[in-house]
Image (spheres, rainbow, N blue to C red):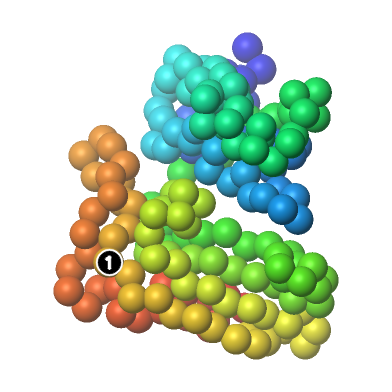
């Protein structure tokens, strides 16, 4: 009842993303991003409830169990929240970390981005741009631009991985103003 109430009242219905945030998601040795299932462009209270249950259950899919076993994450160290967020038709998306993930430098922000929905960045199956920003003063420190050939897009009721038109993926997925 609380999920349906939040979906209809707080979000206002419409398409949502249903995704995980797990306790043991990232450590200095491993990144668990993409191990649990994500459901995009879910509409209707019944479909949202179904996606929440499937997302929670994916904490125990063979892929997630095997990955945790490989990195010696004990079963009692595992907990997960399921997040329901309003969907937006993103031109580009990705992941932002409020510190430099390799060195742990808290004076920097790291951004990985790609054209389309952020799903490809999380899964690692699209080419992604990387940017490092200094927090103070806020400025772009360094960029690595990838030639992107595919993107996740929503079309005709489903999210699919599509080939980009020639030249479409040659420019950065995010410009400096957007990064800042």
Splitting the image into 4 quarters, where does residue 92 fall?
bottom left
- The residue lying toward the viewer, choosing from 179 and 38, is 38
Q: Residue at x 66, y 17 (%)?
A: 2
* Closer to us: 107 or 102: 102
- Residue 176, position in %: x, y? 53, 83
- On screen, residue 159 versus residue 11, left or right, reads left
Mark 1 neighbour density, 10 Å: few (under 14) some (14–19) many (20 or more) = some
Pick the quarter of the image with the C terminus. Answer: bottom right
- Residue 65 vs 159, above or below: the answer is above
**Residue 35: where, in percent of width, then height?**
55, 38
Q: Quadrant of residue 7?
A: top right
Residue carrying label 1: 149
Q: Which residue does the image show at 40% across and 76% down from the upper left?
A: 146
**Residue located at (22% from left, 64% from top):** 164
Q: Is residue 162 visible?
A: yes
Foreground of the two, 62 or 33: 62
* Outermost residue toward the top in this view: 1
Number of marks? 1
Residue 45 shows up from this direction: no
Quadrant location of the N terminus in the rendered image? top right
Question: Which is more toward the observer, 16 or 23?
Answer: 23
Expressed as whole percent of the image width and height from the top left, the position of residue 49 reads 52, 17
> Left or right: where does residue 145 sit relative to residue 60?
left
Helix, strand or loop for disc 1? loop
- Which residue is the extreme one toward the left? 166
Q: Quadrant of residue 42?
A: top left
């Amino acid at each position: 009842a609380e999920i349906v109430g939040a979906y209809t009242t707080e979000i206002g219905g419409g398409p949502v993303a249903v995704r995980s945030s797990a306790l043991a998601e990232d450590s200095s040795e491993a990144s668990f991003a993409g191990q649990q299932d994500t459901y995009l462009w879910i509409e209707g209270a019944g479909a949202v409830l179904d996606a929440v249950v499937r997302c929670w259950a994916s904490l125990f899919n063979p892929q997630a169990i095997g990955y945790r076993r490989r990195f010696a994450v004990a079963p009692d160290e595992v907990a997960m929240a399921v997040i329901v967020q309003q969907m937006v038709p993103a031109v580009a998306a990705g992941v932002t970390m409020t510190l430099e993930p390799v060195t742990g430098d808290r004076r920097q922000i790291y951004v990985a981005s790609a054209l389309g929905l952020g799903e490809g960045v999380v899964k690692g199956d699209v080419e992604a741009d990387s940017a490092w920003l200094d927090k103070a003063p806020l400025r772009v420190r360094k960029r690595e631009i990838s030639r992107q050939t595919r993107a996740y897009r929503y079309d005709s009721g489903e999210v699919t991985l599509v080939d980009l038109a020639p030249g479409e993926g040659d420019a950065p997925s995010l410009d400096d103003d957007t990064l800042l």
